[in-house]
């Protein structure tokens, strides 16, 4: 999205929902046209993740949409049937992007955000009267334009290091359209039933803004942020003071109660076809399967495949995300730890701690530390 629109969505996050609705309506109409169905004859589905950051930890609000490459149409008996859409060409994607831009401009004009006066078009001043909004606005604008909001270097560009050779502008990628600062990327496709590739794509779009491997302190105590991919001018690192780095991180934090994952069409929570389209998870622990399923399992000679858990345990999540092995024994390193019981009775807890040679009495509460942070604005 263009920089003015990024600033607008950062200052007025309530506009993210109507922007996303416009994009999804245009995309779903495009898919219906490629299947030869009318708007009331089929329904598509999508999952959108609203990503707020770029590779340089800059504030870059954009949309990652996982869209079904087709629509569902109900048969005579009411069961949904998937109809795959024809592949799109570059010219069709370019026309689709022009339609999205026109609808977005019409929407924000109707809401009074885009003002036309004496032949000129500009964005109206955001309505941010709260103290929090006024404080965040310079942080957000600076994080979008790669500048510094506060401190002695206010308004200046972030320092850069160039350890790579400059390169020419990249050629046009297939199935990627760029118009007036807007871009549409549709070159990634996952085949049906390729769950591993789909999980990789989902983990990519839900990744955090930074990784520990790309952030380090130099000898001068400054923060060096390594870019994921060098820029065209050869820039490989950004250099900031710790306070400037905290300003950048503060701008990336979304507002409270702002959902960053949205579901559309047949994948929406209240969609009528969702129960027939989305695979159902295994029954809760202790619940017997349906009689037909139990009978079929008894008659089957082949051992049934173990159902995948509906939720991933906290220990497994910590291992996959933070590489923390909670189930490994800290003494031998090979054994697997398991939760035996949760003990809540105080006498039993004191008895166990005393047997282990630990003090059963809690430590006295210490005084709160005095604030030692000093900020320069």
Image (tube, rainbow, N blue to C red):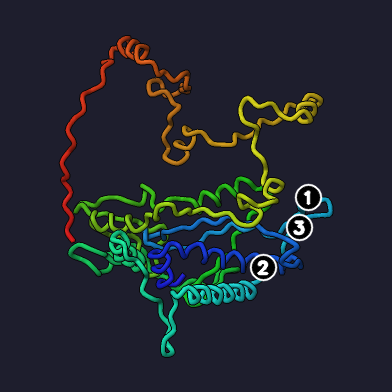
Q: Secondary structure at mark 1?
A: loop
User: Residue 255: percent from the left, percent from the top?
Assistant: 39, 55
Can residue 160 be seen here? The reply is: no
- Nearer-the-camera pick, 22 or 299: 22
Residue underneath mark 2:
29
User: Residue 332: percent from the left, percent from the top?
Assistant: 41, 20
The image quadrant where one finds the C terminus is bottom left
Please count the marks in the image. Answer: 3
Q: Residue at x 39, y 66 (%)?
A: 231
Q: Secondary structure at mark 3?
A: strand
Q: Secondary structure at mark 2?
A: helix
In 3D space, how far apart are the residues under numbered discs 1 and 2 (Cα atoms)?
22 Å
Q: In the rendered view, does 53 fall on the left or right side of 288?
A: left
Q: Is residue 120 above or below residue 341?
A: below
Q: Residue furthest bottom?
A: 118
Q: Residues within 10 Å of mark 3 (few under 14, many from 20)?
A: some
Residue underneath mark 1:
79
Residue underneath mark 3:
73
Q: Residue at x 60, y 56 (%)?
A: 264
Q: Residues within 10 Å of mark 2 (few under 14, many from 20)?
A: some
Can residue 338 be seen here? The reply is: yes
Q: In the rendered view, does 329 fall on the left or right side of 39?
A: left
């Amino acid at each position: 999205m263009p920089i003015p629109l990024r600033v607008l969505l950062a200052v007025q996050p309530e506009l993210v929902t109507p922007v996303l609705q416009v994009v999804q309506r245009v995309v779903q109409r495009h898919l219906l046209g490629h299947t030869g169905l009318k708007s009331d004859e089929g329904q598509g589905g999508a999952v959108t993740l609203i990503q707020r950051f770029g590779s340089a930890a800059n504030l870059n609000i954009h949309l990652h949409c996982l869209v079904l490459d087709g629509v569902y149409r109900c048969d005579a008996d009411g069961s949904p049937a998937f109809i795959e859409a024809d592949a799109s060409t570059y010219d069709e994607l370019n026309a689709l992007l022009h339609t999205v831009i026109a609808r977005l401009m019409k929407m924000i004009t109707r809401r009074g955000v885009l003002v036309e006066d004496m032949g000129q078009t500009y964005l109206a001043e955001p309505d941010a009267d709260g103290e929090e909004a006024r404080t965040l606005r310079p942080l957000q604008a600076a994080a979008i334009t790669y500048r510094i909001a506060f401190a002695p270097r206010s308004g200046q560009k972030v320092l850069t290091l160039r350890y790579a050779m400059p390169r020419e502008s990249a050629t046009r990628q297939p199935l990627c359209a760029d118009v007036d600062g807007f871009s549409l990327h549709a070159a990634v496709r996952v085949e049906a039933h390729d769950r591993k590739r789909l999980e990789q794509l989902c983990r990519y779009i839900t990744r955090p803004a930074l990784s520990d491997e790309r952030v380090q302190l130099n000898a001068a105590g400054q923060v060096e942020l390594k870019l994921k991919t060098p820029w065209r001018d050869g820039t490989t690192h950004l250099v900031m003071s710790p306070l400037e780095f905290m300003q950048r991180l503060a701008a990336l934090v979304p507002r409270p109660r702002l959902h960053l994952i949205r579901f559309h069409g047949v994948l929406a929570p209240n969609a009528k076809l969702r129960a027939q389209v989305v695979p159902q998870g295994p029954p809760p622990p202790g619940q017997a399967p349906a009689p037909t399923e139990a009978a079929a399992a008894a008659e089957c000679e082949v051992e049934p495949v173990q159902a995948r858990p509906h939720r991933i345990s906290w220990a497994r999540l910590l291992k996959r995300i933070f590489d923390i092995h909670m189930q490994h024994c800290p003494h031998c390193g090979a054994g697997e730890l398991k939760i035996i019981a949760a003990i809540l009775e105080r006498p039993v807890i004191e008895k166990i701690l005393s047997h282990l040679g630990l003090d059963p009495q809690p430590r006295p509460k210490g005084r709160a530390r005095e604030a030692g942070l000093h900020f320069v604005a």
